[in-house]
Amino acid sequence: MRVYVNYENKTWKKYDIDFEKIASAAVLDADKDAEVSVTLVNDKKIQRLNKQYRGVDKPTNVLSFELGDDLLLGDIFISLDTVVKEAHAACISVEEHTAHMIVHGMLHLQGYDHLNDKDAIIMEQKEIKILKQLGYKNPYEESNNDYPQCTEESCCPGRWITKLKSIKIRQNSFWQYFLASVFGIICSFGFAPFNLWMLSLFAIGGMYYLITRKTGNISFMKSWFVAFPFGAFYGMSMFWWVFHSVYVVPELTDKFAIWVIPGLLGIGLICGFILSLPFAVIRYISSKPANRAILFAVSWTLVLWLREWFLTGFPWNPISNITMSMPMVINSIALWGSLGLSFVIVGLIASFIELLRYRKSKSCIVVFVVYAVLFLIGCIYGLHNMHKSQPNNMENIPMIRIIQPAKSAEYKRLRVEHSIREVVQKRYQDLIDWAKEDRTVEPDIIVYPETVYPYWVAEPEFPLSRILNTNVIMGVLTYNAGKKYNSMVIADKTGEIQHLYNKAHLVPFGEYRPFGDIIPTPGQLSPGSQAKKIMSINTKYGDFKVAPAICYEIIFSDSLVPRGGTPDAVVNITNDTWFGQTPGVYQHLDMVRRYAIESGLPVIRANYSGISAFVMPDGNVESMLYVGQTGHLDGFVWGAHNTVYRILGRDMWVIIILLFSIIVLKSISVFQKKD
């Protein structure tokens, strides 16, 4: 067998490969005196050939051109760039993968093909047998992933990746989907009240590793399906608690309990499609490892951004929230917001996995260092934000009293034992009694939670504030021009309503029907026309300016303060009675803390059943009333300041992240040529 080797790419010469021996071993049906030409090229040359003869405008590993002659078998072209990349991805040597490509090409020249499953199996079996005779392992066996140069686990981090890859979880097998589901469930434990942030990092890293064992060669929809279990189980394990609300009121239970299982499955379906998108993108797009890590972080960030618009949006639990127990880290969102921190965290995870795989890859090292530097910059700014959030002058600031009723069980009994009129009168009197519970201190502002007022408000007067002889902020239901609103009212000590804010972001399926009457909804309210507003309260210390937020409106990043506005605080009134002591209550508080840091504003939070709290601009909870605790909470707020994030805004940061990623991708191409 005569083998003519043409080194068009001189870099091939540094590899000690016996092309004649390998090609001769692959002679099955051809004459022993046959001739073959092996041309060693780069991606640029093989892409040109691939486009010219196969109509595919991208590089490949090997091309075979059969001449149809018994002696002159044909030509084999092999690209070093693709072979090196694939060898690294499979954790085998370049020599071993090149041997496979030569054998593969030789079989093509002898009439073997893999256009259908039957022919592919025959050809693969031939390849396996020939390579075994040459001393190489089965290239189609997933456990074939040893690093030839690694002899000690302690000095070779890639060895741990090798051990992981030796676990035989085959593509599209039951265990692949099962493991993806487990990773999705584990990921939810990084958030409150568990705060096991390491589990979230492990789950995302594990799923990233699982999904990137192989890339390309399947449709995008198939890629999406492969990643679907992660998103579905991640979503269900994060949001199951929303259905606790159905069982709080017997009337709701009778009417809506039948929708709990379909609703939970619906959450799984929606989250499966949405939250698995970043994994589907990198599974579908065959990319260089360093590029893939950046693409994953960008995709994750864009999914979080787009989630803020779906069905009016539900941006709950961005991955940045797992760092709530790390003040310096979470305060970096004052610089680039939760989307920015999520971009850094996810990028760190992905680049770390790629670095373990390709520890000698300069581009992977550079990308990991880039994300590490970003993380450090965020921490430094986080310290700066924590410093700015400290009180400078505690004089001449109003004292605020938060009322937390937590009386739902008692009111249920009242409704059974008394008339509606008596129940309403009792609730109204309780509002007065709670506010006057501590007469040793006279608050400047009293804040009640969402929808606590027992009457509809349709007039400019508010008698309760006149009775209490102080400024009152309260959640009420209002009626105007045939429409019902969930509102916040601010009334002065004379009983005159100074400001009225109607909730702009309504809760889908709770406050309005997104699909008409197809799925029944407990309430049907109208949205307010103004989402961003600042309202002034006149106190003895001057005007105290607040930005209103009702219930989950505060979870929307960059949503409450008008551009250029300078409030002293955000007032968030809510009612989490529906969720009992499920994770949702604690996660809602973390979303409040997130908004406080991003905006540089303290938050006065009044929750009907808890948790009510004074949250400072660095996310620190200064004081709080726990779930189910009835009483009041007196306190002050301070430290309001502008942040880089509030100046630039969410959408501008998304643009910055995209531009930054493009620049990094362009820059690392220099290092990829050296890999």
Image: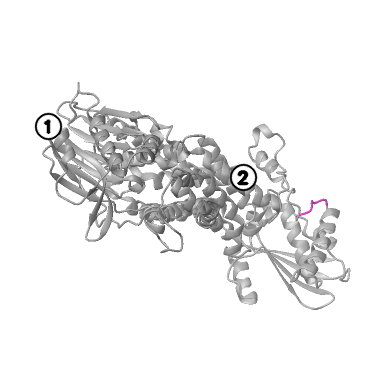
Which amino acid, by three-letter code, is at mark 1? Tyr
The residue at the far top in this view is 440
Report how far apart the C-alphas of labels 2 and 1 lie in the structure.
Answer: 55 Å
Q: Which residue is mark 2?
A: 182
Q: Position of residue 95 (x, y in %)?
A: 73, 53
Q: Which residue is mark 1?
A: 541
What is the quadrant of the N terminus in the image? bottom right
Please state the extent of the stretch shown in magenta in the rendering. Answer: 135-139
Secondary structure found at label 2: helix
Q: Residues within 10 Å of mark 2 (few under 14, many from 20)?
A: some
Q: Majority secondary structure of the magenta segment? A: loop
Q: Residue at x 37, y 29 (%)?
A: 629
- Left or right of 565 in this view: 310: right
Three-letter amino acid code of the residue under disc 2? Val
Please say whether residue 636 is one of the residues in the magenta stretch. Answer: no
Please name whichever residue, 460 or 595, is drawn nearer the observer in this view of the structure: 460
Q: Tell which of 237 and 498 is nearer to you.
A: 498
Which of marks 1 and 2 precedes in the sequence?
Answer: 2
Give residue 625's position: percent from left, percent from top: 35, 29
Mark linked to residue 472: none
Quadrant of residue 428 within the rendered picture: top left
Whole-percent x, y for residue 627 in the image: 40, 32
Going by the image, does 622 lie left or right of 32?
A: left
